[in-house]
Amino acid sequence: MEEAGNFIERIIEDDLASGRVPGNTIVTRFPPEPNGYLHIGHIKSICLNFGLAQKYNGVCHLRLDDTNPAKEETEYIDSIKSDIRWLGFDWGEHEYYASDYYDTLYEIAVRLIKEGKAYVDSLSPEEVKLYRGTLTQPGKNSPDRDRSVEENLRLFEEMRQGKHPEGKYVLRAKLDMASPNINMRDPALYRIKFESHPRTGDKWCVYPMYDFTHPISDAIEGITHSICTLEFEDHRPAYDWATSIDGIEHTPHQYEFARLNINHMVLSKRKLLQMVNMGLVDGWDDPRMPTVSGIRRRGYSPESMRDFVRRVGVAKVESVVDYSLMEFCVREDLNKRARRVMVVLDPIKLVIDNYPAGQTEMIEADNNPEDPSAGKRLIPFSGELYIEREDFAVDPPKGYHRLYVGNEIRLKHAYYVTATGYETDADGNVTVVHCTYDPESRGGTTPDNRKVRGTSHWVSADAAISAEIRQYDKLFSAEDPGARTGNYLDDLNPDSLKVLTGAKLEPSLADAVPGQYLQFMRSGYYMADSKDSRPDHLVFNRTVTLKDSWEKLKQKLNSPA
Ligand code: ATP
Ligand code: MG
């Protein structure tokens, strides 16, 4: 299905039609800073940049924006690459690093100094702030602004040689301290930082600033459409200045779109890193984390996330997307691809008193009623089964259609059974339910076409296997984490993880591996955990419930009793 174009597509189509695009090939880039793992917000930017390149037969570069060596690590670079591939995109040979351009950037800076367009400033960070002015007040020129070219060259060279401590000098562009745009008030181009870089090692102790590096990197790579989030709108004049420095041949253009925000979620690498460092989650790929590695471990499909960002669309205005829209997209997709299996999460025994003692038979079951090509499997059935505790009632409430003494239900794929009695422990908890079965009802229908209202899933007691089941809920219970107290951590949901250890699973799950999408019938979608699941200790993560119980709960709380 072809979507109605977003505003960026219209710009690109105009540019292509009017021959404004060199070689008629659009070039976009996804420019993550390798200072953390990618999150769901980045998915929007990835789908947009790679998607536009696909749609218009262009190219999308992966550029690692590695200009802050203090916070960047190779682990992050590896995770970024693997996450983009998982989403289904490929940058081919176009893998670049801002640090590849350090030499060029340095030469450009020296040239700016020689042309009297940049100067070494010795104001302290506090003074820089004072001199900068405010949104309503113009700034003031630094006393160093008129330093001679020779002295600027000498000082910048000394900065590069490591002769000055961090913070003593910065190199600034000589633009306009009275500009209404604060980003144009002599922006810093270079700062001193005695920090080893993952790629350039100890070669540099001066590092270029974002507003200088990013546009020039775009120009060097021949980016035609440089797409970023709205917070960079105020930086666009600085971007245009940098890409029009004499000697820079290609002129890319910057376009801004609204970032993806989702309620009940924190999308900021800084905060996610804080939760990892504080041990509040099991690492960046904790299945509750809104990181790409987290949702992947939890069992989300890349298709569902691409669908999600497509539905959200690309706009110029900030908005907050509902968490349940994301989960809706996940369910829609997993419904098509997940293999149905039977798992009893909270088991009680069901004994079929008239079933031949010691007999086991194999029952055929669809793997996915939505997809006949998924085939069928055989499940062992016997006279001793497990069913869900909630599927039997001693005193059935009104409208209860599952098992109670005297009531007949269907065991999914198998037989009709009628409860005849039950046993309890000393505390009165039901431990065993007794029933009889109708041998004529094999496969779930009877010769007389008898109707039953309830269907229960089950697992044969002898053949059942065990597993640890991890059920997740939202990491934050508040819609806008931190809005109430100013600290997002105050809104962590204390019940975001529930671990079940007593579940009984059908034996086909012994071979389940991460990457396989499963639906535990009536409970939700699940996936084997990629970190902790082993053949001798299976662990399954609940990806998403079958229905949106949170929405139901909210409605209940909001509706008058
Ligand atoms: P964070 O605020 O989480 O640190 P960032 O913007 O600093 O994110 P970058 O690595 O600089 O992270 O982002 C790479 C690209 O992804 C940028 O072009 C940025 O605009 C985009 N991006 C980041 N967050 C979002 C978001 N929530 N929605 C859409 N795009 C985003
Ligand atoms: Mg950033």
Image (cartoon, helix red, strand yellow):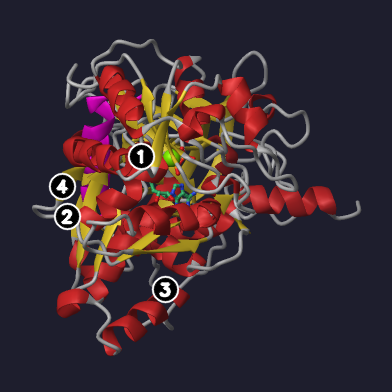
Q: Amino acid at mark 1?
A: Val
Q: Position of residue 46 (x, y in %)?
A: 33, 55
Tell which tag, 2 or 3, sits nearer the viewer.
3
Q: Inspect the image, locate mark 3, and give the three-letter code of the amino acid beneath it.
A: Ile
The CA distance from mark 4 to mark 3 is 24 Å
Q: Is residue 74 magenta?
A: yes
* Residue 110 in the figure: left or right of residue 237: left
Per the model, the C-alpha gap separating discs 4 and 1 is 50 Å
- Residue at image position (30%, 89%) is 18
Q: Which mark is residue 95?
A: 4
Q: Which mark is residue 459?
A: 1
Q: Could you say where residue 212 lies in the image, as x and y percent from the top left? A: 36, 44
Cβ atoms at labels 4 and 2 below 8 Å apart: yes
What amino acid type should be assigned to the residue bearing mark 2? Trp
Residue 8 numbered tag:
3
| Main SS category, magenta section | helix
Give the residue at mark 2: 91
Three-letter code for the amino acid on which mark 4 is drawn: Glu
* Mark nearer the N terminus (1 vs 2): 2
Which residue is farthest bottom? Answer: 17
